[in-house]
Amino acid sequence: MDYTSKIRVLVLDDNPVLVDGLNFLINSTRQLHAILLAQRDQELCEAIKRLEPDVIVADPNFLDRTLAECGLELHELRAGAKLIAYCDARETRSGETYINRGYSGVVTKTVASPRLLRAIKSVHAGDVVIDETVLALSERSLQPCEVDQRKLSTKEEFVLRHVALGKAMKEIAADIQLSAKTVETYKYRAIKKLDLRTRSDIVNYAISVGWLQH
């Protein structure tokens, strides 16, 4: 079978049963092809470079340990592949934490299979994907004082940030796998909290808080 036109996906986790299950799921699709590691625990970094995956779905803790052993940084790995943080729901941090580190997507290990597959395809296409479950966990983890300080919830900030970048509601909705109507609601809540009225106001606010700095 010709795999050259398929998205090459590498799954990295310290649970071999989970890896085998995800590989089987990925290979059940027409667009994706799971890359198999011949020796999971030996010279993993060299294997990653040699296999040249398009997308890496990795438990972030496992990936951090692996890279530390190889003496590599995360940014070196993402130079050749898009990264998805595949997180334990009990240990998941805010979506922005992973995105700021260099991941293009964040999902939990409880996410439904179709959502994970869509996230892989979306990230490969250049989108940023934070699963709704991650957003909900992030909001629940914030203390009241932190909410007051930030003013915006995680979802509201994510939406407003991307509005400032010029993205349409449908694009933002596709990124985080919510309906356009729901995204509009988060935008409305955000601009009401910050007393913003026009897109210029949103852009100026984004600049003032450093969202649009390179």
Image: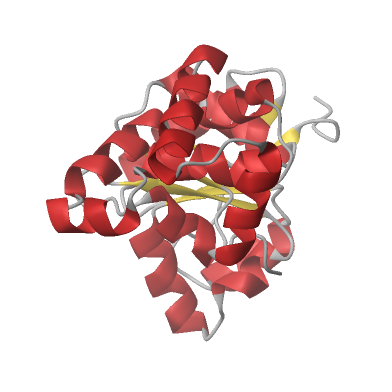
In the displayed structure, 106 sits above or below 62; it is: above
Compared to 171, does 20 lie above or below? Answer: below
Where is the C terminus found, in terms of image quarters? bottom right
Q: Quadrant of residue 64?
A: bottom left
Residue at 85 percent of width and 31 percent of height: 5
Camera-side residue: 76 or 207? 207
In the rendered image, residue 25, in percent from the top left (x then y), is placed at 50, 24
Query: From the image, which quarter does the N terminus lie in?
Result: top right
Total marks shown come to 0
- Please provide percent x and percent y for residue 103: 55, 55
Residue 158 coordinates in the image, percent (x, y): 50, 43
Q: Nearer the viewer, residue 56 or 50?
A: 56
Instruction: Judge left or right: residue 5 versus residue 180.
Output: right
Residue 24 visible in the snapshot: no
Question: Does residue 177 show up?
Answer: yes
| Residue positioned 70% across, 45% down in the render | 200
Residue 75, compared with residue 15, is above or below; it is below
User: Which residue is outermost to the bottom?
Assistant: 71
Q: Residue at (53%, 68%) from the top-left corner?
A: 44
> Could you say which is closer to the camera, residue 59 or residue 150?
150
Q: Give the x, y percent position of residue 8.
A: 70, 41
Q: Is residue 113 left or right of residue 91?
A: right
Residue that appears at 64% across and 38% down: 163
Picture colour scheme: secondary structure
